[in-house]
Amino acid sequence: MSSRTGSSGGKTRAGKFELGRTLGEGNFAKVKLAWNVETGENVAIKILDKDKILKHKMIRQASKGRLKEDEARKYFQQLICAVDYCHSRGVCHRDLKPENLLLDANGVLKVSDFGLSALPQQLREDGLLHTTCGTPNYVAPEVIHNKGYDGTKADLWSCGVILFVLMAGYLPFEDTNIMSLYKKIFKADFTCPPWFSSSAKKIIKRILDPNPATRITIAEVIENDWFKKGYVPPRFKQADVSLDDVDAIFSESADSQNFVDERREEAPVAVAPMAMNAFELISTSKGLNLGSLFEKQMGLVKRETRFTSKCPANEIISKIEQTATPLGFDVRKNNYKLKLQGEKSGRKGHLSVSTEIFEVAPSICMVELRKSGGDTLEFHKFYKNLSTGLKDVVWKAEPIDEETNGAAASR
């Protein structure tokens, strides 16, 4: 901010604004609460420390110019992987821009500043976000329209703008008049410079499609020939969840095909699901709140969830198999444990779900589903589809309170 500052009556002034308390502070700037002394309007003002910026040579970094295409692609690949990971957890960033991208000592890109990010709980009944936010030059047209938008598609638009900036050294949409800027964004009115390769131009134009319905998806970007050049897919650490009790059963049955042991005794067939006592039942519920176990409907799911049923265990198993098979899952059964394996490979390979049925009372069973492989968001979508087919099986008890309505138990 370049306006003249002064002090009057103990209050610091910046032009027509009177500064108040500090709202936030970073390495190079402070954000202060302020109000317009003429209109009384409250605003937030960001004050940059010029000395620190010059000392850390931030000016020279900002004026470095464009990157070579291979270098820009390398950073874009990392950006897409990071954003895709966020989306797989149901998180939309909503303010992607070069200023929010960092590089570590090894040149690995990091996404920062999730202050405007949205979680699944913020979706309205139409499944869309409705808060207009972000930096104007990087924001998607549907966000400006303020009629609801898909946060994942809006994030990809911002990634496309970032790719353009990395390769061109300037913004695709820029105008001193905000309304003129918005008109350019609405029409995707931009021109790629001549040094862009034809394949780079094609992918940027597909990303910067003003119609979110026809805009390329992140999955399609990853399969694009230009994107795949030199691409190394990320490796994800496995969740620290013990699945030995379920996986061992199915591993044993698979290994048995490789050898014959005449003295081997057959494992006894369980005649009833494993009983769960009161202590074990309570321990599965966060905060000793049983409301999440007896959910009315199936909502946000993390790596595991459960529901209760008044149906016999055999009927539950049969219904799960009937519902999961048409969804593209191979079902393997061993007594009252099931292994559901997705036939199609997803974002992180094949989705795998371990399922076990417990008897918590003579007429009540609890079914626990745990993601043992694959992507969490895909598990979420699968669970929602599965719940539709199990509507006659799930016990639809009223929740204890409104807070637990539709919330799935998860750890």
Image: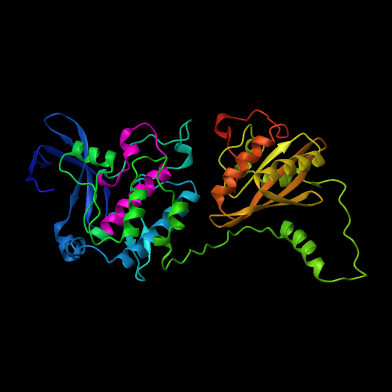
Residue 345 position (above or below residue 262): above
Give me the residue at 62% from left, 30% from top. 400
Residue 248 place in picture, x, y as percent: 74, 61
Residue 190 place in picture, x, y as percent: 24, 48
Q: Is residue 19 left or right of residue 391?
A: left
Q: Is residue 339 left or right of residue 95?
A: right
Residue 157 in the magenta stretch? The answer is: yes
Residue 318 in the magenta stretch? The answer is: no
Direction front: furthest residue: 198
Residue 284 visible in the current orientation: yes
| Nearer to us in this view, 288 or 181 | 181
Dominant secondary structure, magenta = helix
Q: Which residues are magenta?
A: 137-166
Residue 367 place in picture, x, y as percent: 72, 43
| Nearer to us in this view, 367 or 377 | 377
Give me the residue at 65% from left, 50% from top. 370
